[in-house]
């Protein structure tokens, strides 16, 4: 299976995937971000599908088609969203039905969305964690493949808690992808 990774940020999960031996053929980013350098340092081509609008006029379907085209151009079979911060539309989930993974920094179904770590702190939970799941059109709602708990410490802020979660994600995501590659199918 050829793997494509979608990223928007630091790219530490991307680095963990590649450094664990996952064959990443292309990285697609939605903005200029450190993940581009992470890919370049590892000799992986990067395609920037820049998001032109963050307002109500954003054409999510057209944007998603451009992302799908970039993945298809690299003959990708399995898509891994590793901190991709644009919600994608139906064309991705039609083209890659059941073959899109996401890592989320909370124990789904708790704390869906872009501010999961902040929400966990606000809720006062003592344990949160991370989830690797099959992504579907409904945000952060697809079948769960792997989860691991992470304690919330009394003096945590969003940055310290997120980093403790990311340490686990960087192990759980590559391990889950390796299992899929060995099996030859997501489930
Ligand atoms: C991860 O915590 C992921 O769950 C969230 O964004 C973070 C990405 O981190 N959606 P990085 O860019 O891989 O370092």
Image: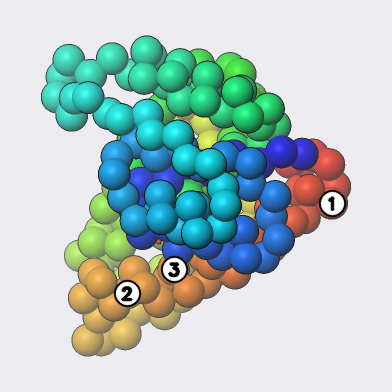
The number of callouts visible is: 3
Disc 2 C-beta below 8 A from ligand 1: no
Disc 1 C-beta below 8 A from ligand 1: no
**Between disc 2 and disc 3, whose residue precedes?**
2
Q: Quadrant of residue 142?
A: top right
Give the residue number, with chain letter if any, for mark 1: 182
Image location of residue 163, percent across then percent down: 36, 73
Disc 3 C-beta below 8 A from ligand 1: yes
Is the residue under label 1 in contact with that under label 3 (CB below 8 Å)?
no
Q: Identify the residue at horizontal 77%, vertical 39% (top origin).
A: 1
Residue found at the far right of this picture: 183
SS for dot 3: helix
Residue 166 - label: 3
Image location of residue 116, percent across then percent down: 32, 56
Question: Which label sits in the foreground, 2 or 1?
Answer: 1
Return the residue nearer the eye: 59 or 105: 59
Classed neighbour count for the residue bearing mark 1: other residues with Cα under 10 Å, few (<14), some (14–19), many (≥20)? few
Return the residue nearer the eye: 44 or 161: 44
What is the C-alpha distance between the residues marked 2 and 1?
32 Å
| Structure colour scheme | rainbow
Rendered view: 116 above or below 112: below
In-image side of 99 versus 160 (left or right): right
SS for dot 2: helix
Q: Quadrant of residue 30?
A: top left
Q: Identify the residue at horizontal 14%, vertical 24% (top origin).
A: 55
Give the residue number, with chain letter if any, for mark 2: 161
Residue 136 can be seen, yes or no: yes
Image location of residue 32, percent across then percent down: 29, 44
In-image side of 165 versus 115 (left or right): right
Rendered view: 187 above or below 61: below
Q: Identify the residue at horizontal 31%, vertical 50% (top origin).
A: 33
Quadrant hosting ligand 1: bottom left
């Amino acid at each position: 299976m050829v793997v494509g990774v979608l990223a928007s940020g630091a790219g530490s999960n991307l680095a963990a995937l590649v450094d664990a031996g996952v064959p990443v053929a292309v990285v697609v980013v939605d903005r200029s971000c450190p993940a581009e350098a992470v890919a370049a340092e590892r000799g992986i081509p990067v395609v920037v599908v820049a998001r032109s609008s963050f307002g109500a006029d954003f054409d999510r379907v057209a944007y998603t088609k451009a992302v799908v085209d970039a993945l298809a151009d690299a003959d990708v079979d399995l898509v891994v969203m590793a901190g991709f911060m644009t919600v994608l539309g139906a064309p991705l989930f039609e083209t890659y039905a059941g073959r899109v993974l996401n890592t989320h920094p909370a124990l789904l179904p708790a704390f869906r969305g872009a501010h999961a770590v902040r929400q966990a702190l606000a809720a006062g939970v003592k344990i949160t964690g991370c989830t690797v799941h099959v992504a579907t059109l409904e945000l952060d709602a697809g079948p769960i493949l792997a989860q691991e708990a992470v304690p919330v410490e009394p003096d945590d802020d969003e940055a310290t808690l997120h980093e403790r979660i990311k340490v686990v994600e960087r192990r759980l995501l590559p391990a889950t992808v390796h299992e899929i590659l060995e099996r030859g199918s997501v489930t």
